[in-house]
């Protein structure tokens, strides 16, 4: 049996697809991704399949460089650390990426302070592992639920975890886009490792940047993943995020388990953890403490008692987190064979229903109207075929097929409109009409 035949004998147990898109409001794409599929059953058992999403931050090309370094370094380092258990190797690889990004930032004034989020998924015979720094996300759909398996390192999530703001109501004066941890800005970084999560056929994992999660709700993501193949789903999710404004770069990786992996690998036991040296308080922490400190004084002077109290609490929470990370008893990470992390952090219903199918039907109709009003050259036969199948499925209460066909109608139209924009760019020096 040749190598390709051997590969076919085991790789059929996994489906995957990946897509990155600049969005509608950004000039360049600062997201990066990596898909590293094990090249043999032996490598699958020892190191698994690796998937990485990174969302860069920084002026000029700094964010793009930071995310690219992350998705280059993490796979290389992870596979070099073959003697370490996968959880330790994954954490060490993410720290290696942090070192490389930080060094590049310190060596060039233009790149100083650059950073990136990272979410990494390793699919092993004994289960799935996730590594996390920042607010890109990792999800799992199992049955009728979608669960977020990663914790957002953002001010909002940190304050929620500390019980300072309610779960479902974030005050408007608390910024939602401030992250509390990233790769690059500081010489050291804490890495969250979650899992391993035992695998079942049908489990679907999704990694994404916040260009998706900021525009598409968890339950909507889950419903689309429940209805579509990975290849169809990544396109539908990117299209939906763009239709809702596309304010940021969008990156999506979908991995579906279609059968048992190879025989379980051994998990190495490690010695008891030992303490790391104190870590410096991050620049982000100082900025946040200063921001909320000034806000507290201002709100108190305005006699806005409740907002002033909340702002003071936020100052204390950020300060407590920062100084605990410097002086607290945080052990250097060693894997002892027990499940890691506290996931899932959220859970939503992923069952396709009439309401979601109707929402997609209205979206498809809006696209039809926009194309007709602008007199674009559209292959209506393809769009109409998907729309008619979707309508028939919805009438038969087959919402899985209805959602799938409506998503395909939307993606078909988005593809046609992208072609139309290309024609207009070639035929005119004037600005292209914004699709949305």
Image (cartoon, grey):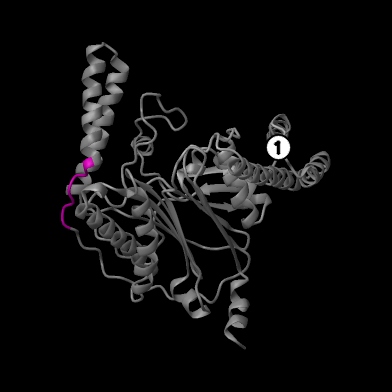
What residue sits 52% from the left and 79% below the top? 40
Residue 261 coordinates in the image, percent (x, y)? 56, 71
Q: Quadrant of the N terminus?
A: bottom right
The residue range painted magenta reads 277-283
Q: Is residue 61 above or below residue 269?
A: above
Relative horizontal placement of residue 97, taking residue 260 as reference (left or right): left
Establish if 158 lies above or below 147.
Answer: above
Viewer can see residue 320: no
Q: Is residue 301 left or right of residue 156?
A: left
Q: What is the total number of numbered labels drawn onto the structure image?
A: 1
359 or 223, which is in the foreground?
359
Local crowd at mark 1 within 10 Å, few (<14), some, or many (≥20)?
A: some
Q: Nearer the viewer, residue 311 or 273?
A: 311
Residue 71, position in %: x, y? 40, 60
Please identify the quarter of the rendering in which residue 429 is found.
top right
User: What residue lies at 35% left-to-right and 48% top-to-bottom?
Assistant: 63
Question: Which residue is the extreme one toward the bottom?
Answer: 1
Residue picked out by circle 1: 376
At a point 59% along the width and 46% down the height, the residue shown is 237
**In this picture, is 411 found above or below 170?**
below
Question: In terms of depth relative to the viewer, which is nearer, 202 or 106?
Answer: 106
Q: Quadrant of residue 135?
A: top left
Would residue 264 be visible to someone looking at this image?
yes
| Magenta-colored segment: predominant secondary structure | loop
Indicate the quadrant containing the C terminus: top left, top right, bottom left or bottom right. top right
Q: Tell whether position 205 is magenta.
A: no
Q: Position of residue 361 (x, y in %)?
A: 72, 36
């Amino acid at each position: 049996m040749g190598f390709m035949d051997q590969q076919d004998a085991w790789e059929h147990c996994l489906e995957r697809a990946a897509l990155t898109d600049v969005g509608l409001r950004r000039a360049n794409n600062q997201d990066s991704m990596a898909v590293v599929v094990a090249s043999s059953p032996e490598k699958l058992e020892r190191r698994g399949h690796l998937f990485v999403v990174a969302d860069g931050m920084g002026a000029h090309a700094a964010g793009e460089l930071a995310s690219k370094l992350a998705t280059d370094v993490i796979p290389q380092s992870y596979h070099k650390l073959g003697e370490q258990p996968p959880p330790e190797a994954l954490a060490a690889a993410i720290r290696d990426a942090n070192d490389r990004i930080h060094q590049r930032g310190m060596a060039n004034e233009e790149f100083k302070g650059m950073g990136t989020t990272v979410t990494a998924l390793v699919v092993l015979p004994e289960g799935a592992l996730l590594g996390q720094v920042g607010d890109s996300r990792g999800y799992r759909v199992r049955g009728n639920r979608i669960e977020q398996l990663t914790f957002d390192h953002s001010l909002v999530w940190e304050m929620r975890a500390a019980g300072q703001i309610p779960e479902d109501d974030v005050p408007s004066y608390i910024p939602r886009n401030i992250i509390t941890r990233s790769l690059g800005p500081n010489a050291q970084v804490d890495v969250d490792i979650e899992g391993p999560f035992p695998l079942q056929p049908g489990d679907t994992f999704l990694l994404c940047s916040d260009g998706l999660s900021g525009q598409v709700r968890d339950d909507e993501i889950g419903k689309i993943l429940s209805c579509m193949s990975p290849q169809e789903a990544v396109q539908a999710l990117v299209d939906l995020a763009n239709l809702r404004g596309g304010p940021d770069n969008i990156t999506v990786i979908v991995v579906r388990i279609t059968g048992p992996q190879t025989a379980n690998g051994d998990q190495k036991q490690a010695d008891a953890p030992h303490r790391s040296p104190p870590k410096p308080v991050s620049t982000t922490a100082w900025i946040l403490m200063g921001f909320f400190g000034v806000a507290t004084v201002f709100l108190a002077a305005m006699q806005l008692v409740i907002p002033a109290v909340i702002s003071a609490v936020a100052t204390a929470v950020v300060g407590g987190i920062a100084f605990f990370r410097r002086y607290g008893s945080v052990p250097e990470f060693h894997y002892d064979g027990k499940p890691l992390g506290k996931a899932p952090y959220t859970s939503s219903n992923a069952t396709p229903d009439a309401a979601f199918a109707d929402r997609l039907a209205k979206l498809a109709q809006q696209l039809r109207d926009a194309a007709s009003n602008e007199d674009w050259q559209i292959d209506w036969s393809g769009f109409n075929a998907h729309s008619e199948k979707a309508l028939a499925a919805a009438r038969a209460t087959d919402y899985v097929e209805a959602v799938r066909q409506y998503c395909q109608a939307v993606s078909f139209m988005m593809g046609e409109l992208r072609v139309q924009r290309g024609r207009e760019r070639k035929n005119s020096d004037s600005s292209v009409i914004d699709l949305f």
